[in-house]
Image (cartoon, rainbow, N blue to C red):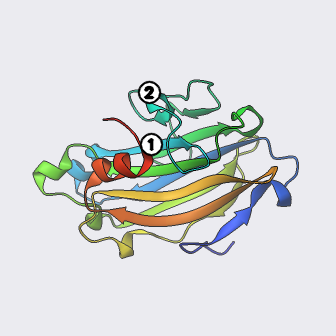
Amino acid sequence: MADMIRGSNVALTQEIPSLRSIVLGVEFTAGAEKVLTNNLVVATILCDHAGRALSDEHFVFFNQLSSPDESVAQRDAALGEDNEQIEVDLPSVPPDVERIVVVMYLNEGIAQRRSLGQLRSCRIRVLNAVDNAELVRSEDLAPMLTSETALVLGELYRHGVEWKFKVIGDGYSKGIVGIATDYGITL
């Protein structure tokens, strides 16, 4: 399977009509940078048609492990090569959710002069939750990073009645504050 580059997308449910549940896996390597590794947070934002979070409760992260309807949930333990995994039950996602955005940010490492540019590798992938078969894998996003402290990895989005996945790879120099501003989340 070829790696998907930034900006590319794939029609998941059009290509696999039986697809009902997926796992969004995030894999990163920081080498000996334990401060960086220990302060990385992976989160998801359930967005409306305007690209804004439906509410603060639609920001799924370590303090809020699932969306209010439980269609999107962070797994307690990641399987395989992923550091973090988010499970999405596609038929249960409320109709007013147009996009499910996966982000990564430094929680407290900024004060210790860490950035995502120190990552050796960073990828997002999509798995079929039924058998853990890999459906999509992004290119390594780490070489594109410099001083960013947050990153939009990718998004799962509706296209008519189908679900598509897009690799984003956009960095933020203002960390979670920048993401919160763009997606309408109160911190």
Q: Foreground residue, 127 or 89?
A: 89
The residue lying furthest to the left in this view is: 112
Taking the image as shown, residue 100 lies to the left or right of residue 169, namely right
Viewport quadrant of the C terminus: top left
Amino acid type of the residue tagged 2 in the rendering: Gln
Give the percent coordinates (x, y) of residue 6. 53, 72
Q: 133 or 144, which is in the foreground?
A: 144
- Please, is residue 43 above or below residue 10 in the view? above
Where is 69 relative to 27, above or below? above
The x and y percentages for residue 2 are 65, 75
In the rendered structure, the answer to whether residue 80 lies left or right of residue 19 reads left
| Residue at 56% in and 66% down | 138
Question: At numbered mark 2, what does the secondary structure look like: helix, strand or loop?
Answer: loop
* Residue 131 pos. (x, y %): 75, 44
Which element type, helix, strand or loop, lies under badge 1? strand
C-alpha distance separating marks 1 and 2: 10 Å
Q: Residue 43, which numbered label?
A: 1
Count neighbours of disc 2 (C-alpha within 10 A) and say few if under 14, some if 14 to 19, many if 20 or more.
some
Is there any visible trace of residue 129 in the rendered image?
Answer: yes
Does any portion of residue 81 appear in the rendered image?
no
Q: Are marks 1 and 2 in contact (CB under 8 Å)?
A: no
Return the residue found at the far front.
50
Q: Amino acid at mark 1?
A: Ala
Determine the image quadrant of residue 10. Answer: bottom right
Residue 79 image point, x, y percent: 56, 42
Which residue carries the number 2 mark?
64
* Residue at the spot 26% in from the left edge and 43% down from the top edge: 107
